[in-house]
Amino acid sequence: MARFGDSKTGPMMDKFGIPVVLTYLGADYLSNGIRDEVDETMLETDTGAFVGRTIVLTLRRGDFPEAGLVSDALITVDGEDMTIISAARREDGSLVRVLCART
């Protein structure tokens, strides 16, 4: 497992990221994140599958309060309002994978 750590993820987000704003308890938290839209199998049966497009953000864990990265929280990604579906740490815990939906 690769260990990124804060010293590498900060420059990575600055170079490749887009603006992300989370409002939590009246305060705005602003940082950069990496957005990816991928096709993902949502439901699979013996006769076929339902495939849908998912929006995934990769964020630095320390940039946003973990208590704010919860289901149904509102987040602005590159100027577009979205709702958080779920959030989970990745690899060594320095990054968070956030599944979003357009509002």
Image (cartoon, rainbow, N blue to C red):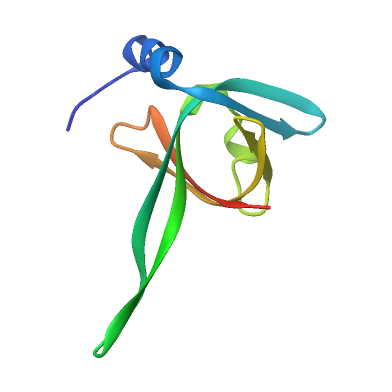
Which residue sits at x=63%, y=39%? Answer: 67
* Furthest-bottom residue in this view: 47
Q: From the viewer's perspective, tell me whether residue 65 is left or right of residue 93.
A: right
Q: From the viewer's perspective, tell me whether residue 24 is left or right of residue 38.
A: right
Q: Nearer the viewer, residue 56 or 93?
A: 56
Q: Nearer the viewer, residue 11 or 26?
A: 11
Which residue sits at x=57%, y=36%? Answer: 66
Residue 90 in percent (x, y) is at 34, 38
Residue 96 in percent (x, y) is at 43, 36
Q: In which quarter of the image is residue 97?
A: top left
Q: From the viewer's perspective, tell me whether residue 57 is left or right of residue 77.
A: left
Quadrant into which the N terminus falls: top left
Which residue sits at x=59%, y=41%? Answer: 69
Look at the picture and state if 93 lies above or below 85.
above
Q: Which of 74 and 55 is in front in this view?
A: 55
Residue 80 in percent (x, y) is at 65, 38
Which residue sits at x=64%, y=21%? Answer: 30
Look at the picture and state if 17 lies above or below 40.
above
